[in-house]
């Protein structure tokens, strides 16, 4: 098992107190996707969108990495081959647990992006529609998160990693948002062994050779322990 590629979703941060999107009472039950997670919604009401991400940024800053994040950091430190985490999460809990090789395919809450010139910088705690870009001075500042209808980040790194993976694992994701939802199928077709770790069956479960069911804080450390003891 040389190259391990791990896709994470909101379920890995749930036990850190960050709500998921599609579980009962999740974020998409409280907010309309088209209002807060599309370029059109931002053009209609930038203040509403900033309010949504400002609140999420504050929650994420208070949250602590949990045992699942820590186990993945340990895996990266102790596994003799490469461990690459592709996360759909916009929180920084993987990095705060010590993971280094992390790609945020849906962006990061703690980064700001200029919609005019593409410049990126560390986001302040509270972003406002009147904030100007520090590089071009245009007032088109937005959270550096990928919205529906936009292309996820890092595809040029993700595609080859899936093709070269010996082991692909998906943790805490419902398998409903593409392209990430197809990564298990892609990696398996290219020869990887595939494992899904989730509370329940997902829309993509059929693409996995093994399915481990339970809370991320319980099943991820056990899974990592097993991998390291076999290495
Ligand atoms: P979802 O909310 O769609 O799915 C979360 C998954 O985690 C579900 O399958 C739950 O069963 C599982 N889960 C919940 N608690 C868990 C726990 N404690 N341990 C293990 N599993 C648990 O979140 P994502 O799949 O991450 O995109 O959603 C993908 C994308 O949809 C997000 O990145 C976001 C959203 O719209 C954008 O905003 C672009």
Image: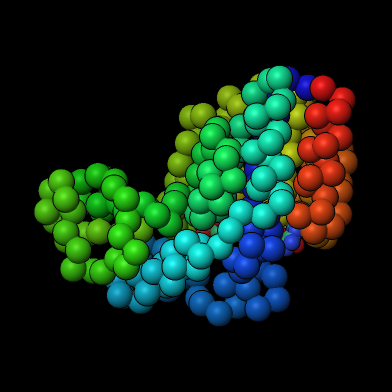
x then y, percent, for residue 30: 55, 79
Query: Which residue is at a point 68% across and 58% down the rendered structure image?
Result: 11
Name the residue nearer the viewer: 127 or 106: 127
Residue depicted at x 68% and y 40%: 72
* Residue 27 at x, y percent in the picture: 57, 72
Confirm whether residue 116 shows in the render: yes
Q: Quadrant of the C terminus?
A: top right
Residue 131 vs 219, above or below: the answer is below
> Residue 106 or 126: which is nearer the viewer?
126
Q: Position of residue 71 (x, y in %)?
A: 71, 42
Picture residue at 50% right of the left edge, 35% below the top: 155
Q: Is residue 187 among what the camera can see?
A: no
Q: Is residue 66 left or right of residue 141?
A: right
Residue extending furthest toward the left: 137
- Image quadrant of ligand 1 equals bottom right
Q: Residue at x 11, y 54 (%)?
A: 137
Q: Would you place residue 16 above or below residue 28 in this image?
A: above
């Amino acid at each position: 098992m040389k190259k391990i590629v791990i896709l994470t979703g909101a379920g890995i941060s749930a036990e850190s107190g960050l709500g998921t999107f599609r579980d009962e009472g999740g974020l998409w039950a409280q907010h309309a996707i088209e209002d807060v997670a599309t370029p059109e919604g931002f053009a209609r009401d930038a203040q509403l969108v900033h309010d949504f991400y400002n609140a999420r940024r504050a929650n994420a800053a208070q949250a602590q990495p949990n045992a699942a994040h820590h186990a993945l950091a340990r895996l990266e430190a102790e596994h003799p081959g490469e461990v690459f985490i592709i996360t759909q999460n916009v929180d920084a809990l993987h990095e705060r647990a010590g993971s280094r090789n992390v790609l945020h395919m849906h962006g990061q809450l703690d980064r700001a992006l200029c919609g005019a010139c593409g410049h990126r910088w560390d986001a302040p705690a509270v972003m406002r529609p009147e904030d100007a870009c520090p590089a071009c001075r245009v007032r088109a500042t937005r959270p550096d998160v990928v919205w529906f209808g936009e292309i996820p980040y890092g595809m040029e790194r993700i595609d080859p990693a899936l093709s070269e993976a010996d082991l692909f694992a998906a943790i805490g994701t419902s398998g409903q948002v593409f392209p990430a939802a197809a990564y298990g199928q892609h990696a398996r077709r290219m020869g990887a062994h595939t494992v899904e770790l989730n509370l329940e069956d997902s829309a993509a479960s059929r693409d996995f050779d093994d399915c481990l069911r339970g809370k991320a804080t319980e099943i991820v450390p056990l899974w990592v322990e097993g991998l390291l003891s076999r290495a």
